[in-house]
Amino acid sequence: MPTLPNSLQNRVERSKVAYFFSLPRPAKQAIMLFADVAAVSLAYYLAYMLRLRSFTEPFLVGAYWWLTLLGLIALSVMLFAAAGQYKTIVHYMSGSAVNRVLACILASSLSLYVFRWAFTLHMPRSVPILYFVFMSLFYGGMRLMVHNLYVFEKRNKVSPHVIIYGAGRCGTELAAALQTSNRYFPVAFIDDDTAKQTMLDASAARRNSCVTFTMPM
């Protein structure tokens, strides 16, 4: 079967990623919402399947199994919306944002005990724990994938290259801010401190990022 050259394949991949990020906000929010609904449903089913060791037995628990799934989806979506997960595409998640997401997943998991009590549902006590593990993996994996796609699209987008004078704290903070935007792409620092050259070049080698040049005074 004929294959495309690597350069043409990369161009096609970049065009698909660029198309995704060029979609209007409602369309991207709808995609994120659909992905979260699928993640909640799959995590709920896998938690039951792993605990009961059967592919089909979770569907035979009864009608309340499906009602619990619908309630879990509705509650999880409301929690994620309250945490601001549908306002913008996630380009970067700070530590506080990660904590909010984990708190939402934990609240969603604990709600299963409420549904279990309200519907007198046959639900092993380990199901909410397994659901929390699966949901953390699925939700975190999807957000990480979106972040990597954003970085891929940004790196392949032609932006003016800039050199930052000064490799101190302000210079590195400026570089970090520019790397999260699409307007400029920092490629190097200029500083008269040779110690900063060794330190920043080692860090840049790990991130494939800026290099540092020293300038005698």
Image (tube, grey):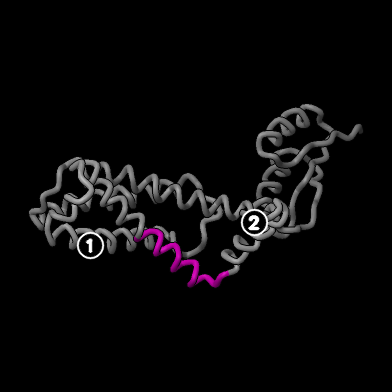
First reached walking from the N terminus: tag 2 or tag 1 = 1
Direction from residue 77 to residue 186 in the image, left or right? right
Q: Which residues are magenta?
A: 23-37
Q: In the rendering, at what x and y percent does residue 170 appear? A: 71, 44
| Residue at image location 75% in from the left, 58% down from the top | 158
Alpha-carbon span between mark 2 and mark 1: 37 Å
Looking at this view, is 94 or 131 the one in front?
131
Q: Quadrant of the C terminus?
A: top right
| Residue at image location 81% in from the left, 44% down from the top | 165
| Label 1: which secondary element | helix
Q: Which residue is mark 2?
A: 153
Q: Which residue is mark 1?
A: 71
Q: Quadrant of the N terminus?
A: bottom right
Direction from residue 125 to residue 39 in the image, left or right? right
Q: Is residue 48 above or below residue 14?
A: above
Looking at this view, is 62 or 208 the one in front?
62
Report if residue 24 lies within the magenta region.
yes
Q: In the rendering, at what x and y percent does residue 25 appear? A: 52, 70
Q: Is residue 212 above or below residue 68?
A: above
